[in-house]
Amino acid sequence: MVKRVKFSEISPSEFFYRNRDLAGFTNPSRSLYSAVREFVENSLDACDEAGILPEIRVELSYLEEGRYDPQPYRLVVEDNGMGIDPRHLPDAFGRVFFGSKFVLKQARGMFGMGGTMAILYSQITTNRPAKVSSSVDGVKRYSFKLLIDIYENRPIIIERRVEPAERRGTRIEVSLYGDYTRAEPKITEYIRQTSLITPYATLHFKDPKGRELHFERVTVVMPKPPSPTKPHPHGIDVEALRRMIRLSKERTLLKFMSSNFHRVGEKTASAFLEFAGFDKERDPKTLDNEELVRFVEALRSYNGFLKPDSSCLSPVGEEILRAGIMKSLEPEFLEVVSRPPSAYSGYPFIIEAGLAYNCKGIEGLKLYRYANRVPLLYDEYSDVVSKVVNDELDLRRYGVKPNTSLAIITHICSTKVPYKTVGKEFVADRPEIERELKNALRELLRRLRRYLGRKRSYEMVRRRMNIYGKYLPLLARFSKELSGMKRMPRYRSLLKEGELVEERHG
Amino acid sequence: MVKRVKFSEISPSEFFYRNRDLAGFTNPSRSLYSAVREFVENSLDACDEAGILPEIRVELSYLEEGRYDPQPYRLVVEDNGMGIDPRHLPDAFGRVFFGSKFVLKQARGMFGMGGTMAILYSQITTNRPAKVSSSVDGVKRYSFKLLIDIYENRPIIIERRVEPAERRGTRIEVSLYGDYTRAEPKITEYIRQTSLITPYATLHFKDPKGRELHFERVTVVMPKPPSPTKPHPHGIDVEALRRMIRLSKERTLLKFMSSNFHRVGEKTASAFLEFAGFDKERDPKTLDNEELVRFVEALRSYNGFLKPDSSCLSPVGEEILRAGIMKSLEPEFLEVVSRPPSAYSGYPFIIEAGLAYNCKGIEGLKLYRYANRVPLLYDEYSDVVSKVVNDELDLRRYGVKPNTSLAIITHICSTKVPYKTVGKEFVADRPEIERELKNALRELLRRLRRYLGRKRSYEMVRRRMNIYGKYLPLLARFSKELSGMKRMPRYRSLLKEGELVEERHG
Amino acid sequence: MRRGTAKRRKEEVEASLRKLGLEVYRKLDSGDFPEVRIPSRSVRNIVYDKRLRQYVLGKAFVRRYAGNIKHIRSLTQLVWLAFFVDKLLKDGKTSTLRDVYYSAQAYNMEFKDQAESNNIITDLEALLTKAREDFNIYPEERSSIFGDLTIEYTIPGYEGKRINLSSHPDGYMIGPSLSSAEFVETSAEMVLAVEKGGMFTRFVEERVHERFKALIVDLAGQAPRATRYLLRRLNRELGLPIYILTDGDPWGEHIAAVILFGSANAAHLRELTVPDGKWIGVWASDIVKYKLPSDPLSDVDVKRIHELLRDPRYKEGIWQRELKNFLKIRRKSELEAFSKYGLTHIVDRYLPEKLELVKGL
Amino acid sequence: MRRGTAKRRKEEVEASLRKLGLEVYRKLDSGDFPEVRIPSRSVRNIVYDKRLRQYVLGKAFVRRYAGNIKHIRSLTQLVWLAFFVDKLLKDGKTSTLRDVYYSAQAYNMEFKDQAESNNIITDLEALLTKAREDFNIYPEERSSIFGDLTIEYTIPGYEGKRINLSSHPDGYMIGPSLSSAEFVETSAEMVLAVEKGGMFTRFVEERVHERFKALIVDLAGQAPRATRYLLRRLNRELGLPIYILTDGDPWGEHIAAVILFGSANAAHLRELTVPDGKWIGVWASDIVKYKLPSDPLSDVDVKRIHELLRDPRYKEGIWQRELKNFLKIRRKSELEAFSKYGLTHIVDRYLPEKLELVKGL
């Protein structure tokens, strides 16, 4: 007997409400950590994008005294960033898939839903509204109390107020169930690692037990902020091309190409079209399916395109990275490298990496993984960096002995980091990323090998200096005694020659 | 200088197009595996729900001969299930968040987007339309060629045909980029493990090299199909309650309770409302925020509710599980257990587990993880089962020596399995699930310990039988020689007593 | 000089064995399960006897009762061993531990491994409070002796024969015939026991036996029991003071301590110790005083020192002081380290200085 | 009976040492860097000499040239060692490997570890084709001997003294004085060398020396070089056949083979082998024939057999046959396994049968 099957559709916030595990809100401990993290990242983004030296204050407190974990907490995160326009403020925090981060530009947040998920989670667990307030001008501050209508995927505004502002920036306050006892190590490690990659930020954290962590900025140099960009032709798939054509107003392939692709001007476009065998004057909208496929295959195989530039990316830069690592790890030897931009599936990315040898407080090998300046703390073994370090590099080949104190810091920045989960904890192993990581780490390891080699050979040379001075007289004395001769042999002339022969033998 | 920030909203299929890594479509090898898997699961669901003994045919072939991996493949999956109504067929495969699986009932597919994602992926990589056809009556078969309009999240129907059907069921054909060389072990392992948990199904797999895998059904007993259910009061959060009230037409709390909650009739409802201090006649829509919170807290702490029954769940059952494991692993010793239903966050679940000792072809410990009859092959170390087996159980305490050939089979069935990723590869560590897993495995391990103990002690007893017969005469002889006596001592009477004393000593 | 010690001991052992046989026989013959009570050798029953200055067993016993199926096998093994030893002694033969293990098979007895058979041998030692050398069971390891000592053999075929142990400068093996020999006469005034064969040869070469009127013993590492028994006899029967010279590390110190005060795993035996003996080095303080080449202590060394510091034998005097010195200087030296000053330095300088010093202690 | 062997060898060594000293001196004195060429001991230069029936070094040399900074240290060490050995011989003193290591410090020389100093000693052996015992350098390990052999010592203080090695039944240590003694007379007609001390004692007890007119040697495992040298001298100078009795496993077989044909790591030496000697068991075939208690071969045993099968010393006859037998039966037995038939069985039955059999080979 066949039954009738009911079909239906749900809203995005409904989907994520049902599947909040996907976004890192698995249990009270992990959820508390995820909430801290999502808000801090939003705050840092809000400063970076405006070129403001960040000053972030995080405060976690018990909602009621004397309870045991898991229990409700109040979480406040406050920044001096550029603020959010009051017209968008409720939507930005009360609607899934709504945000400023759906353009092709590097940012910490990416799915446009981290903050909203944290509010969703707090609402589910404590049923208290979130309080968000923001000032874009340092004059007026707009405050909202809001809940999320999950069914409809929209914010419900409970209260709206305008007050005089003391300074620019955004403040968010939520009440949520958490387990700080278990989350504490991760949260403090998160803030510590964030300060390593953001040495131009000042971070304050006050925990529910009243303990405070302060990280003062050590540099006022900020990374160049990124600007939105067009997609690179090497990474375009058929679907992407189809959509670009539909959205484009250009009527010829030449114009279409030169106005829609990253670093493609008329000259490049026309060379490419000739290579691919398409008429420059053809209306892109007339391409049929087969032609679209051929066009994409030609885009992929053509070698004449310029490499993606990094204008849309905001790498930390060697100087800042070096300052951050130096301050955090105090290594004996440190090298950093910023790889040239590369791309996967049309998304440009840059790998930055640091290698710190003989660090304070580190025994053996430790990985610091970052993606778009966000530290990744969970699921290390599923990450592409672990895969490269453990499976692809043989550290001993670089003269690194087991148990050497060694920190490997990797930073992948991209307009889109290929996370495997919405919880943003580990990066998928795209071959292009794997290759760049390998190149970066090999370069650093070669420099470390040179350093270790120099260190050793310096000591060698000094030792050799005295060898002839020591052994020739002994040789003379023993051969005299053994042969029963009366006087010492005349060996002095050899003292100098010894050195020369040595130099020849290298 | 503060820049203007652009806010915008995107569609769900847009989101997943941008973030296809999340759904397991990471690289050509993984994507091929994910596509096979999504379609096979849809097919099995379509049979199970209608009580049809499944017969599934999977065929993978090269789209063009003589190319190298990664290359385009044709994937065909065909079943004898109940078919899909032609009115819903295009939406079911061409729209994200549209499906039959958003009700509270156990099914393999869950996010309502696995099949759609596979089609999305095939479209992106080969730009060829998918062909889907289905017959619900065995008479007429409706066929569609379709593409997905990602921007608008809806199917584009390219061709629609009606033909006479040879039998009931659904067939789907897609062309997609893949890497079979690397995916082969996972795909064959997936089909093998699927046959273990579905011994009532016949599975055929033909691979691009022309090799075939056949798994014939070994039983015609099918698990009882699940029926949709209402949520259990213990697992309700404030948000869920708010939504139930909004959707309900009941005007009193008593009626509201007894018509919306799992196993709550008027008697239970009235006892609860008394306990919680709410007026039975109160209109649920008049509850304010504070009251909602109090109501939910009362729901959680009230002990009078019945446990969730398993009508909405479809465990495999001990008989079928045993048949499947026996056939696949041929163990020396096998025990299976089906735990009573339990619930987390309002979702009922059942843990089933098997423990197979001394299996064919298994060395050391091997985990077979299933969720709603789906084998989980990736990311074993992030899964709750690994956590329990490795961290919470000390196998040696149960007499299991290291390197013993041991298979642990776990099956969690639930109206909603808390996956950590959309790719459905590992289960989050909810405390309720962890506890049930622990109980199930401990029970099985205790039985194994008994078995191993009996095996040992049987041999012990036999050995002891002859001990007195052997040693008493020797003792007599040596003491005679040592003491220098002439004749043997009269010890024969002791031969019987020895046994008695032994029995007394236990 | 007492005489006949060796012979008297043999008769004692034979009498105890017969008594054991008789007890078991009588029980069996009257239809009862025989039993034997053996002093327990468990750690809790090992105590340090301050008066005897050695480890001894306490009052706890282990019961081997033939009526218990878990005991009958080991009890039979024990009685078989007593019977086998009795035969060895009567026939004037010796045996190794390994021989005992295999010999059982000739009697339909078996041991599951060497450890089991060794354990039964120790049971019999504990039961009779006699060392296995008294049962004519000798280990493989041998040390050796040299010097002016005339002995008279008691083993079959050599009864009454005498030799003097100063004729062969490479040394005489200390085996069954020497262990069972009677001492006749000596001109020696002390015994110098050294840890290593190389040093033994050095001492002979440097005529230490003449210059110091000494018998020289090569301990060959941790001294075998036959050697410890011989040292005790030399001390008791001939009144010779015993001086022990080892490597300068905790292991060397322990070699000396075991000879003087016995070992925990021979707590069931008496008459193996020489409480009046002296350890004459190499002390930790000698390493500093003589500026010896040295190596840093390893982790194992340090761990061993901490173990010994808790041991009652090391509670006082030189024993305690030197352990602490090792810990302080964190270094160790071997006997050969004196070669830094020439091969004869240890005999010419160190030995006389040290003997002088120790006599005053 | 040849006489004076020991003395002649000593003079040869002293002459070679002086020659080495003179060469180095002359080069230095004429302003040139001295050099020494030492036969290479690398695996590629070790070849099996069928005629000599032992491993020997090929024609390759290693050059130690003082002008090369990598060589000057080891060349100086070599010359120092020659000087030190010369002194040892002149003073009639002996030394252990360890002593050499430490003695260097007295001369401002140092070795970074014992391995380095041992290696230089082997260099000098290879250069002079003489064993380190010829340099008066003896290892710690000692084996022993018993039986009717009268020797005359040559070491200082004992020159001309004679003793007979049958007076002390526990055995005489084989050390520097025995190695350097001259043989005076013997009534023995063969030498029986056994792998283990326990079996040695058994043989003495069972009067094997009288019943078989034999000298009995305890090899104490893999025979030290001094013992191998002694066995060769007993064979060459006294014309005594050498019979070797070991455990029945590949390791025992190899102990015998090394005595007869030398070892690869002494390929730079001659006069340590006894190619006419015989291995009289325990053979793999004896394990079957005598139904001996046995243990299964371990993986290491099997691996060892396959190594030996590739070794030219094992290419033919009994050596090849028994290795294959071990592989076939997959079991091994110890000498003590004969105790299954009573302690004296090995002497009463096995030994005469086996000697009879082997003489026919």
Image (tube, coloured by chain):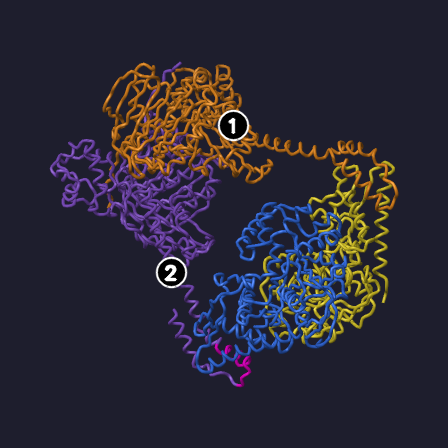
Chain colours: A orange, B purple, C blue, D yellow
Residue at 88%, 43% in the rendered image: A486
**Residue B18 vertical position relative to residue D303 in the rendered view, above or below:** above
Residue at 19%, 40% in the rendered image: B260
Residue B351 percent location from the top left of the image: 32, 48
Residue B113 percent location from the top left of the image: 33, 35
Q: CA distance from mark 1 to mark 2?
A: 59 Å
Residue B88 image-quadrant placement: top left
Between B227 and D179, the residue placed more toward the observer is: D179
At label 2, which amino acid type do we have?
Arg
Q: Which residue sits furthest left?
A: B281
Q: Which secondary structure class fits the magenta region best?
A: helix
Q: Which residue sits furthest front?
A: C360
Residue D135 percent location from the top left of the image: 79, 53
Magenta residues, start to end: B472-486
- What label sits on residue A326 in the rendered view? 1
**Residue B122 vertical position relative to residue B168 in the rendered view, above or below:** above
Residue C93 among those drawn in magenta: no
Instruction: Specify whether disc 1 shares its chain with disc 2.
Output: no
Residue B483 among those drawn in magenta: yes
Residue C278 percent location from the top left of the image: 64, 58
Q: Tell me: B369 left or right of C140.
A: left
Q: Which quarter of the image is occupied by the C terminus of chain A?
A: top right
Residue topped by disc 2: B450
Q: Secondary structure at mark 2?
A: helix
**Residue B412 vertical position relative to residue B287 in the rendered view, above or below:** below
At label 1, which amino acid type do we have?
Met
Foreground tag (1 vs 2) = 1
Question: How many numbered dots are placed on residues in this image?
Answer: 2
Between A24 and C141, the residue placed more toward the observer is: C141
